[in-house]
Image (cartoon, rainbow, N blue to C red):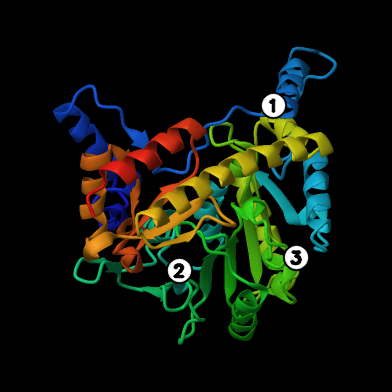
Amino acid sequence: MARINENYYKLAAGYLFPEIARRTRVFLEKNPGIKIMRLGIGNTTEPLTPSVINGLHTGVEKLASVDMYTGYGDEQGDTRLREALKSQYADLDVNLDVSEIFVSDGAKPDSGNIQSIFGQDNIIAVQDPAYPVYVDTNVIAGRTGNFNKAKGLYDGIVYMPCTEDNGFFSPVPDQKVDIIYLCSPNNPTGTVATIEQLKTFVDYARQNKAVIIFDAAYSAFIKDNHLPKSIFQIEGAEECALEINSFSKIAGFTGVRLGWTIVPKALVVENTESGKINALWNRRQCTFFNGASNIVQEGGLAALSDEGVNECQGLINYYMNNAQIIKYGLMEIGIKVFGGDNAPYIWMKTPDNMSSWEFFDKLLTETHVVGTPGSGFGPSGEGYFRLSSFGHNEDILSAVNSIKQNLDI
């Protein structure tokens, strides 16, 4: 008799973003005709840049020509694109081999898929609050116990609280763990780890033969040159870390889908030699994946050209201007806010000690603005709320004005 994977039943009541959509839909059904202003999900809104569009057209046109037609490509990605990514890292003084770069269809699937090459009994540690995919995919894989409703967390996962007291970056675990998920700039808090902070985790991982899965999907938003954009800017990280990144926020590829993962050959865990983890990920990709779209990779290559980089920086500046509007608008009405300077997210403290979901309903009802409850990112997110700067400038201004005029605090 066939059986399902019962680990799915462990997942806490509904994925965060579908629950936001459900509550919003219920509100609209009761209040038809009201315009909702969405500052919730980090979904890009501005058109792809001219260079990227030209690149995508090039990809399409190649498929229309017998001489230039391409079928299956390399599972690891187009060599030209991997070379371009290698050059981007070289600008950060990070030296990579092309064989350490794996192009994919996005950071989110890579974040979930990467843990499949590690043992079932590994102990997982996550920043708290954290992007839900880190936790949920390990729940589905069977590495956790049940969800503890009283504590708002899963048994069997080590949560590293990121609080206001520690600047939203936790110290290393006080116990031995095997796989550590770090995200900087952080989603949802918008804070960026310093070199010194990341070094503590690199030192811990090297001492404990642990692996850091470093999500750098928002690294292009870092303006402060003193802050690291890659875990590999930390000495020794190539021995204990891998890095996941994406074109989604850099170039607006949320609906186009393109990302990459760096798996250094120097990365080792217990009972492995150099190159083994790299080879395992290569085997996984060759088994489950036929490579990113040829068309999309042409767009990615265009985004990494000199002209494309300048154009995409314009997109980033646009969203960061939105972030400043949100941040300072909230500050004007006395709300305590974090992030928004080197990341596209604003992390705000809910007024009057309201719960995250209580504030969600209040914000929706009074201002018609949708945001993201902090508790959906983990127990340390309770009492906080995330707003996203991804949106049209005029919509951001309207949402902030509505909050300033209508939110009763």
Judging by the rendered image, the residue that carries numbered circle 3 is 265
Name the amino acid type tagged 3: Lys
Image position of 77 (left or right of 46): right
N-term-proximal mark, 1 vs 3: 3
Q: Residue at x 41, y 49 (%)?
A: 387
Residue found 68% across the figure and 38% down from its top:
314
Label 2 SS: strand
286 or 104: nearer the viewer: 104
The CA distance from mark 1 to mark 3 is: 29 Å
Q: Amino acid at mark 2?
A: Val
C-alpha separation, residue under disc 3 versus residue under disc 2: 24 Å
Residue at mark 2 to residue at mark 1: CA–CA distance: 35 Å
Is 98 drawn above or below residue 354 in the view shown? above
- Which residue is under mark 1? 295
Number of other residues with Cα within 10 Å of mark 2, as a class: few under 14, some 14 to 19, many 20 or more: many
Q: Which residue is mark 2?
A: 126
Vertical position of residue 201 compared to residue 228: above or below: below
Indicate which disc residue 21 carries: none
Q: Nearer the viewer, residue 66 or 18?
A: 18
Q: Residue at x 51, y 34 (%)?
A: 393
